[in-house]
Image (tube, grey):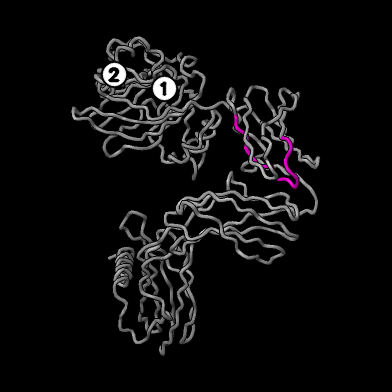
Amino acid sequence: MNNISFLKILLSIFVGVLLIACEKDDLDTGYAIDLKGTPDVYESVNEKGQLEIPIQITCEKGLKRAFYKIVTKAVDSEKLTIGSEINIPVSGNTLDTTLVIPITMTLNSVVIAVFDNDDIINLRTVKVESVKESPVLTFKGGIKVRKTVAIGIPFNINGNVVSEHELKLISFETVNNGQKGTPVSLALGDKKNVDFIASVPVAAGLQYVLLKAENIYGGIAVDTFKVSNVVSGDFISLTMEQNLTELNYFFDQEDNELKGNIASGSDIKTLKYAVTKNGTEGALQTVNIGSDAGNDYNFSFKVKGEQGVQGIRLVAENNGAKTVTVNLTVPAIAIRATYLQDVAMSTDPADNKCFFSAYRTPHVYGLAEGKTNQLMIDWVLTKTSSGVQPISLHAYGASTTYYANALPYLGGFTDLTYLYLSSLRATMTQANFNTVLSVKDIKTYVDRYIFGPAPEGQAYNIYTSSRRVGDTFSASKTKGGFVIAWGSHTHPTVSPAVVNNVSHAIVWVKQVTQKSNGHWDIVFDIKFPKDDQRTPNNGSAIAPYSPYPL
């Protein structure tokens, strides 16, 4: 038996001992692990809290080493994962310490192991039956700082608390010169989803406000709203939502919403804005804030995006003639990516959904329409022996198998367009797919997650790679992301291939199902550039060639 196998066996035995310890901790070791009243089983604990486990041991033979391991269980799963050893320092014959374990939603148990100088192991386990999810507290618009407040003039903090379990309270307390004030409770209303407004009194030395939400199980969410400056006289300040200073998503030919907050000593009088276009600032435009804006106002107004817009200046004034100016820059006018959702295709010719075109509506069509719109087709969805596969028409003769799969759809075609299609890319996720909003984002995305280096990317050259067929989807491969691209490709009979993929799109497959007749349906989302990328890149379209007649 080699050393590696022997170590694996020892590891398996030890893991087994740890798991057995989850059921039985009364091993006869001659010394005890005293947890000072800590229960062996917690029926429930609260997420984001801490388990404090005191340990006291007296061992005549002396303590050699000790450690603990955290056992986790994935949400909605029975699979247990045992973490790595976390050392507990020991020396001499006694141990008196306290373990502090952070509570996460996956916490299942804590296994404590102690060895005496004769290598006799003693085990104790603290199990957790369930973890109660804590409330989630957020501030409206992501604003959690007030630049200026005035002594004697209250201001409002707006936010929301969502809780899986009923809320017991929402409260706030001010902190002045390091001293906490008396907590003030807020009305609950709906005890699982509360929009709150905290009216905060202002005194000299105010530094921040602590917001707290607690559910009926003791689960707590706490956050801090900071105050940067306290003044004794009138003032006015303006803060953009998310504290924006640059408008990176100011979309062309769209009404772009600008949101923020105005805080003031005296009541707010006006809010105006001016747009700078091609180096020239236009006239100030008045935003309707009504006659009762008071001294704390959340504003929202829209500005149309146009080429040449470089910035927006906002000016607010209060009744005390105090003004504040905020300048927002527009680095570049953004072009919104076209986003098609829940696109449904089928390999069944009878469904008339086997061809996809990004730049011809209604985007999906069947054999008859395909023949009359050949130069606008991006891919054909083919039925294979093991599933469903999108392929470029350019690849119909890549092999006898591809030819056989494509022939039922391409009979009579004379123009076969080129499209690059990648396989599923592991670095693409639903979450990062959802972040793409603009045409610029698409390029940034593929450069980061596909072309870029590990760990985020895959160092895969999607600009010059020759790949004209996508993955084969099936009952066991139903979700994931891939990339397509428009560009140029030499004729399939030319080797080596010369490829230039110039414009990309990203696809997220959401569902793949097989029909009763053996054909396949597929549903996906796709994001691609707004302007037609198909027509300018049709120079690589080919005619049918031997030995693959159509």
Per the rendering, the mark at residue 149 is none
- Residue 207 placement (x, y as % from top left): 70, 59
Q: Residues within 10 Å of mark 2 (few under 14, many from 20)?
A: some
C-alpha distance separating marks 2 and 1? 21 Å
Q: Is residue 352 left or right of residue 156?
A: left
| Relative to 286, residue 75 above or below | below
Marked residue nearer the N-terminal end (2 or 1): 2
Left or right of 257, for residue 204: right
Which class describes the residues within 10 Å of circle 1: few (<14), some (14-19), or many (20+)? Answer: many
Residue 238 higher or lower than 217, as above or below: above
Q: Indicate the position of residue 389 as horizontal and vertical percent values.
A: 31, 28
User: In which quadrant of the rendered view does residue 230 lie?
Assistant: bottom right
Q: Residue at x 59, y 43 (%)?
A: 141
Task: Report the residue that reaches farthest toward the front.
Answer: 291
Query: Residue at coordinates 68% horizontally, 67% vertically from top-left?
Result: 179
**Amino acid found under the numbered disc labelled 1:** Leu
Residue 264 located within the stretch drawn in magenta? yes
Judge left or right: residue 223 versus residue 46: right
- The residue pinned by badge 2 equals 352
Above/below status of 442 relative to 62: above
Q: Position of residue 54 (x, y in %)?
A: 46, 77
Region rendered in magenta: 256-270
Q: Nearer the viewer, residue 49 or 374?
A: 49
Residue annotated with mark 1 = 419
Q: Amino acid at mark 2?
A: Asn
CB atoms of marks 2 and 1 within 8 Å: no
Dividing the picture into quadrants, the one containing residue 470 is: top left
The secondary structure making up most of the magenta span is strand
Identify the residue at image location x=30%, y=58%. 78
